[in-house]
Amino acid sequence: MDATDTKILMLLQENANISIAELAQRVNLSQTPCWKRVQRLEATGVIQKRVALLDPEKVGFGLTVFVSIQISDHSGEWLQRFADVVSAMPEVMEFYRMAGDVDYMLRVVVPDMAAYDNFYKRLIDAIPLKNVTSRFAMQRVKSTTAYNLAPAMGH
């Protein structure tokens, strides 16, 4: 990847609907080479997919919960089963295996406390867990999906 690829990626992160013509103009390329670069970035998995970002409150998902989980069983079979169970839960927006004092961290988004209670009961019934701690977000201060590529690319 070069500086032009970085510019393309930064612009697509701002607006995935930008036309190839406008994108090409903004990165100082003609349309065909620009289109070929975008195709290559998609083919190599740098661009995973293009999506519409929704406002969670406006679509009825007003409660964000960060769930930290500690487990007792660290066998490969248990971990795979746990990953499968949690990944299949549509309320789980992000799911990370952690280093430190917790084993897993989830970002769960639900309409309200009753929906979270339902999720929580399904989670603890599905698989044995040592400890589950829920932290409820009071306010979303910053939320972005765009990576700041300039420093990572040495610019």
Image: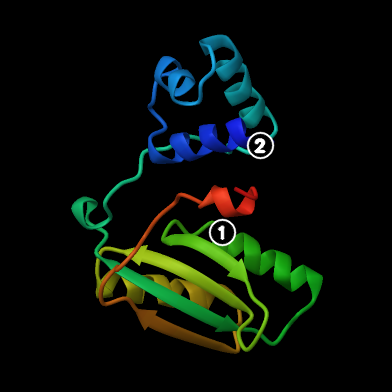
Residue 59 image position (x, y, % from top left): 23, 51
Q: Which mark is residue 87?
A: 1
Decide: is 85 above or below 101. Answer: above
Q: Amino acid at mark 2?
A: Gly
Q: Secondary structure at mark 2?
A: loop
| Position of residue 41 in the picture relative to residue 116 (left or right) | right
Task: Name the residue nearer the viewer: 42 or 154.
Answer: 154
Using residue 124 as the reference point, say whether residue 110 is left or right of it. left
Residue pictured at 53% horizontal, 12% vertical: 30
Establish if 64 lies above or below 20: below
Where is residue 11 shown, x and y percent of the image? 45, 35
**Going by the picture, which residue comes out furthest to the left?**
58
* Element assignment for label 1: helix
Q: Earlier in the sequence, mark 1 or mark 2?
A: 2
Q: Residues within 10 Å of mark 1 (few under 14, many from 20)?
A: some
Question: Residue drawn at (45%, 23%), measured in percent from left and top?
Answer: 23
Q: Which residue is mark 2?
A: 45
